[in-house]
Image: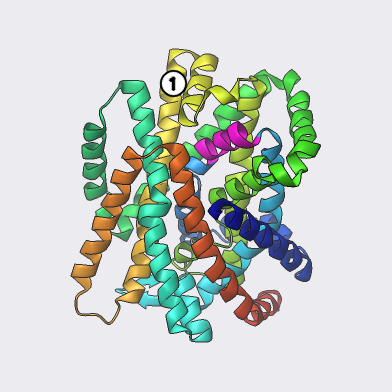
Amino acid sequence: MFDVVVNIIVIIFFILAFLTTIRFGFIQFRALRETKRILVDDKNKSSYSTFLVSLAAHIGTGNIVGISTALIYGGPGSLFWMWVFTVFSSIFSLIENTLAQVYKVKINGENRGGASFYIRYGFNNRFLSALFSIFFLLTNTIFFQPLQINTVSESLNIVFGLEKVIILALLFLFTYFVIFKGTKRIVRFCEHIVPIMSIGYIIVAVTIILVNIKFFPSVLGLIMKEAFSSKALASGSAASCLIIGFKRSLFSNETGLGTAPSISAMADIKKPLAQGFVQVIGAFTDTIIICSLTGFVILIYQFDLNSYKGVDLILYIFERILGGFGIYLALFFMLSFAIATVVSQFYLGESNLLFMISKNKRKKFYILIYKAFFLLGIMIGVNFSTKALFGFVDQGMILLGCVNLYALYRLRNDFKREIKNYYN
């Protein structure tokens, strides 16, 4: 029953994205030109840093394990529906990240903001703001984070045969020395790891595709054929292709969920809409480029997808293509993608927590509780299966998405105003 509700809400989400895109004249398609001007021509270092932190938060297991499970359970056609969903849902990314700049505030000398902030200060709804913050805290501790941790755990177990208790100890140590040491260390970590992991992964995947370029047209044909097959579009099996593509796209880039705005608020930029454009490119990079490359590599080699669960498929593919070195290369990518996301998710949750307790004298106590939930998420990720954890992910997406989309609707006039301000 819960799965049916999730599927219906995801379809409604897409319909709203489609209508909103038309309403604003496909404005998100201007993002590439505007982002080039902001990051390259104007050399806005602050916006660049937040762009990398955002990529770290979103380029995670959704780009590797997410796409592999989408192909395993939904078939090749699910990749096409991921593209479609991303193209239209990116309008929400433009709106929410613009609003994050409009309603950001200074807390302890740092820019903080996000959905909780624009709900509270944009249309003065304290209850909904607090509710979103609670959902966000749960999402970044026990809903989304465990899947990232599960990727780390499964990878280390398959490659090195490490026991769960050892993996837990290693993760706890990393969390203490990197994640719990403040925003500056988080940003510095992301600035170093994200370019390496994303560019390196793109180079490796593109090389594999070019070496097998003669098979590429047939892969594209298979994707399109499966996407529009009667089986994929039949009402009784929609969840096996179209819906899975939609859900994995939403998990991959999180457009419209109100997660990225907490990062966008960090930037110092003159016109809020500019940061929105930057984040749209982040969504496209995340799903249209990196997820697609993963999908192409998997489909080129025509594996029996039903024989795998997710993480093991990626490790086996790289091992088959590159030999013994390949499995360690795949391990590096999955560990760096997952860990970078976990690091960024801690910052996202912390921003919302600080917003909730800004006037509370027991700040240290609540921060300690948050860290305890964060560690609980690590324990869940190590001990649950990948398939089970996607159920956690779906719950988090629905909770965040429903509240955030309502907020974007209420603040639509603020967004219209920022469009006028940007082009005047």
Question: Which quadrant of the figure contains the N terminus?
Answer: bottom right
Q: Relative to 51, say whether 120 is above or below.
A: below
Q: Relative to 34, say whether 241 is above or below.
A: above
Start and end of the magenta stretch?
63-74
The residue where tag 1 is placed is 327
- The picture places residue 414, in percent across and down from the top left corner, at 62, 81
**Residue at 47% over, 24% down:** 315
**Residue at 63% over, 41% down:** 289
Name the element at disc 1. helix
- Quick check: 231 left or right of 134? right
- Quick check: 400 left or right of 192? right
Q: Quadrant of residue 424?
A: bottom right
**Residue at 68% over, 52% down:** 85
Q: Quadrant of residue 22?
A: bottom right
**Residue at 41% over, 53% down:** 143
Residue found at the very far top of the displayed protein: 323
